Amino acid sequence: MNIHEFQAKQLFAQFGIPVPRGKAVKTPRAAEKWAAALDASVYVVKAQIHAGGRGKAGGVKITRERDEVPSLAQELLGKVLVTHQTGPKGRKVRRVLIEEGAGIDKELYLSVLVDRKTGCPTFIASTEGGMEIEEVAETTPEKVIREAIDPAVGFQGHNGRNLAVGLGLFALEKAVVNPFIRLLENVYRLFMEKNAALVEINPLVITTEKTLIALDGKVSFDDNGLMRHPDVQTFRDLHEEEPLEIEAGEHNLNYVKLDGDIGCMVNGAGLAMATMDVIKLAGAEPANFLDVGGGATKETVAAGFRILLKDKKVKGIFINVFGGIVRCERIAYGVIDAAKEVGITLPVVVRLQGTNAEEGRTLLTDSGLHVDVATDLWEAAQKIVAMKRNTLSPRERAGVKE
């Protein structure tokens, strides 16, 4: 789960990570009131969406004039901001963060996440603060510093000193070394205690007064740990999430919307990935990742089928099930129930293998539904791609949107 920058900074403050004075507002009038209370020499107005690249997209405004703050807020509120992370649709700005500016002497990059190779929480730091870390890693990899933390021991002083040396703080900014190490410890504590997947500060600035401030912040959480943190759950903003993904979550389905036009329903994440690969190999693009789980019931399958049909981009549906824990006739009943409720207007191919596969195929064949049943994965993928193409208009086949 992702959260907004202003929410990340609330968490930073709770864990002793210094942040600018600021407040998120939803109206120009509230912006005017807060600007008066803030009474800063520099005001920063920042659009709040779950995406990076806001500055380049015009989502960050800076002014020295307090009277300009309400108009800057009004300019951003309600605007659809398009960044490299939002896609062409962009995200609507519903809040802006108004905070005091800082006298910046130096910008650093800092984050902590789990390194999948080592299985350890790992700090990533760079002297190139304010830049995308992926770009820094590609163009100047020597400027990216990593420090793994042994989770059995936790953060230690030497971990902080290693990072401080790597960033050149002992030579250039010795006054901030000890505060920097304390900040690292607090960041690690936030990461572990809140079951975060990522804590990122970009930039972490050294001010002209030789203090440290988290000028920007990004925090994402492991969904599996949210049950332990009701306070974090309150940060969820449904406006920033795909509606079909929200609906899938209500049915305990794992669903991610993609850009293709072949809807996929599969039981098991590995099989789902393989299914998307074989669809691409057959010449089409998957419209989603949908894993109904190893213990899928008739009800969850029906819910998944309804979700696939609600995606207007979907031109064909491929259901690929290997019955191990789940029995194939349950999948068949779920498809039949959902199809009768919603109505099938798209080509559907169902491939069943495993427990009670023959029974499931028979149920689908005898249901009277326009469903093509297959046993071989490659055959099934080719069928759904061919059937989808046959339903397209000549203009759609040529790539022209109707």
Image (cartoon, helix red, strand yellow):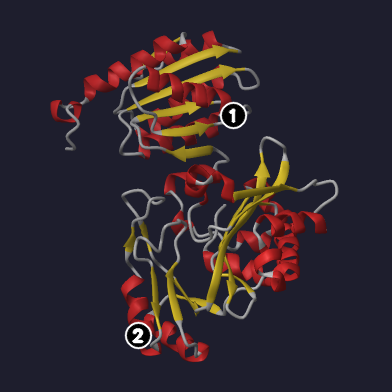
Residue 232, how many percent across, how many down? 64, 61
Quadrant position of residue 184 = bottom right
Q: Residue type at mark 2: give it.
A: Glu
Q: CA distance from mark 2 to mark 1?
A: 56 Å
In the rendered image, residue 3, in percent from the top left (x then y), is placed at: 55, 59
Q: Residues within 10 Å of mark 1 (few under 14, many from 20)?
A: many
In the image, taking residue 95 as reference, residue 284 lies left or right, namely left
Q: Tell whether 200 sits left or right of 248.
A: right
| CB-based contact (under 8 Å), mark 2 and mark 1 | no
Q: Nearer the viewer, mark 2 or mark 1?
A: 2
- Which numbered disc covers residue 68? 2
Q: Is residue 312 visible?
A: yes
Q: Is residue 233 above or below residue 63?
A: above
- What numbered label is drawn on residue 296? 1
Instruction: Please name the amino acid that badge 1 sits on.
Output: Ala
> Extreme left residue here?
394
The single residue placed furthest to the front in the displayed view is 171
- Residue 15 seen in the figure: no
Q: Tag 1 or tag 2, which sits nearer the N-term?
A: 2
* Residue at 39 percent of width and 16 percent of height: 381
What residue is at 47 percent from the left and 45 percent from the top?
A: 139
- 27 up-or-down from 337: above or below: below
Closest to the observer: 66 or 331? 66
Query: What residue is rendered at 68% in x and 65% in y?
Result: 171
